[in-house]
Amino acid sequence: MKRGVIAALIAGLGITLLSLPAFGVSGTLQVTKECSKYTGGAGSFCTITVSNCDAIPVGSKIVYAKAATEAGGLDTDIVINTPNGDTGYGHVVLDGATETGTVTLKGGTGQLAKLAGDLVVAPLAKPTYSWAGPYSY
């Protein structure tokens, strides 16, 4: 009798373990974004041209909620819209003089619901910029 109960418990536990979601993805995000369509106004965007993250693929758009400051800097929320309809949320602070700054990623929808990251923004050849740093989703 005990063996039957133990077998049932093990089988039940196995089913429960199989139904758990997979562990999240984490690592170092490396993104290149092209900003020729960015006007500096609220709602303008940059397009991701290189990404090592499957959940933020090439073609994703980074939309800026607020306009750039008079000095060309930013302190605004952003939305990452992926081609498959997932959305990531974050905030960027950028120095207009050096074009360097930080991006904090936090939450979203779909695959990006648990998005988190602390990234460094660096200029490449204008109008191209990089994001790099630890992230998870």
Image: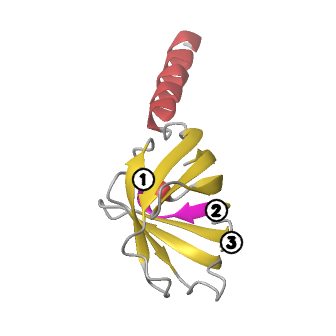
Measure the alpha-carbon separation of dots 3 and 2.
17 Å
Q: Which residue is mark 1?
A: 56
Position in image of residue 86 (x %, y %): 39, 62
Q: Are marks 1 and 3 in contact (CB under 8 Å)?
A: no
Where is residue 104, by image quadrant? bottom right
Q: Residue at x 66, y 74 (%)?
A: 96
Looking at the image, residue 120 lies above or below residue 69: above
Q: Which residue is mark 3?
A: 97
Disc 2 residue type? Val
Q: Which residues are magenta?
A: 105-111
Q: Secondary structure at mark 3?
A: loop
Q: Which mark is residue 103?
A: 2
| Quarter of the N terminus within the rendering | top right
Pointer 3 local density, CA inside 10 Å: few below 14, some 14–19, many at least 20: few
Q: Residue at x 45, y 37 (%)?
A: 19
Looking at the image, residue 64 lies above or below residue 126: below
Position in image of residue 75 (x %, y %): 67, 78
Disc 1 residue type? Ile
